[in-house]
Image (cartoon, rainbow, N blue to C red):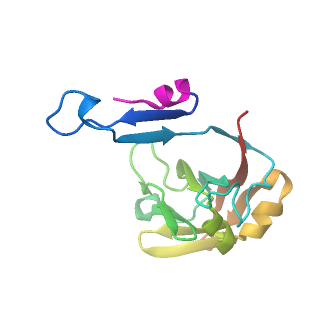
Amino acid sequence: MITVGDVFNGGGRLVVPLVPKGKKNTEDSSASVTLSCEVFDLVSDVTSVTAKGTSDDDNLNNGVLTVLLAGVKGLQGEGKDLKTQVVVECGDKTFMSPVVMECPGIDANNPCYDSPYRVLLTPEIVAAAPDVKFTMKNMDKTIGEYTIPFEDLLSAPESCITSEFLIESGGTLFAKSYIKGVKKQA
C-alpha cells in the first residue's frame, strides 16, 4: 500500500513498478505508474480564483467556496408543525441540511444546523460564476429564499459575506459564505 506520505517522502513524485498478475516481483515487467502531488495552502488572496486556472493544468482547483449554515432564530408557527430544512445550491452542486423537527431537547422554532458545505472552484465553475442560493423549506413548502451573487462574494472584504435574511413566515436564517484562494507551498 502506498500513502500520500510515501509520495511526499519521494520529493512529491514516486515511480511505482507494476507487478504482472500472478508474479511476485517486478523483474518480469518494465511497466510503472508515476504518482505526484503538490500541497496548496488556502489563502485570503483570491487572485487564484480565475476562469483561466492556476497553471498549465486547467483541471487544477483554484480555490474553495465554503458555506457555513448556522441556523434559524424565531420561526413562526407551532413547533409540532415545523419540519424545516435548508437547501444550499451553487451551480450544479446542491446540499441539504438535516431536517429539524420538534422533539425533546430540540426547539423547532429555533433550529440549529451547524452544517459546513464546500465547493472546489475549478476554472469551469469560476467561468460559470454560480450564485449561492439558500432555500428554507418547511416540509416541501418553500418559506424563504436568498441568493448571494458569486461576483458579490468574490469582491466582498476578505471574500466573505455573513448573511442574515428574513424568512417569509418569520424568523431569520444565519449563514456565512466565503472564498479562499490557493497558493502552492514552497
Q: Quadrant of residue 124?
A: bottom right
> On screen, 124 above or below 68?
below
From the image, give the main secondary structure of the stretch colored magenta: helix
Residue 52 position, x and y percent, is 71, 65
Residue 26 percent across, percent down from the top left: 28, 30
At a point 52% along the width and 70% down the height, the residue shown is: 92
Give residue 38's position: percent from left, percent from top.
Answer: 60, 39
Q: Is residue 144 above or below residue 60?
A: below
Most distant residue in the top direction: 9
Residue at position x 33%, y 29% in the image: 1
Give the camera-side residue of 144 and 46.
Answer: 46
User: Relative to residue 52, is residue 20 drawn left or right?
Assistant: left
- Is residue 170 shown to the viewer in this render? no
Number of marks drawn: 0
Would you identify the image quadrant in which residue 160 lies? Answer: bottom right
Q: Quadrant of residue 51?
A: bottom right
Q: Nearer the viewer, residue 152 or 139?
A: 152
Q: In screen coordinates, is 112 left or right of 184?
A: left
Where's residue 64, x and y in %? Answer: 64, 52
- Which residues lie in the magenta part? 1-10
In front: 93, or 113?
Answer: 93
| Quadrant in the picture for the C terminus | top right
Task: Reply yes or no: does residue 174 show up in magenta.
Answer: no
- Give the left or right position of residue 178, taking residue 5 as reference: right
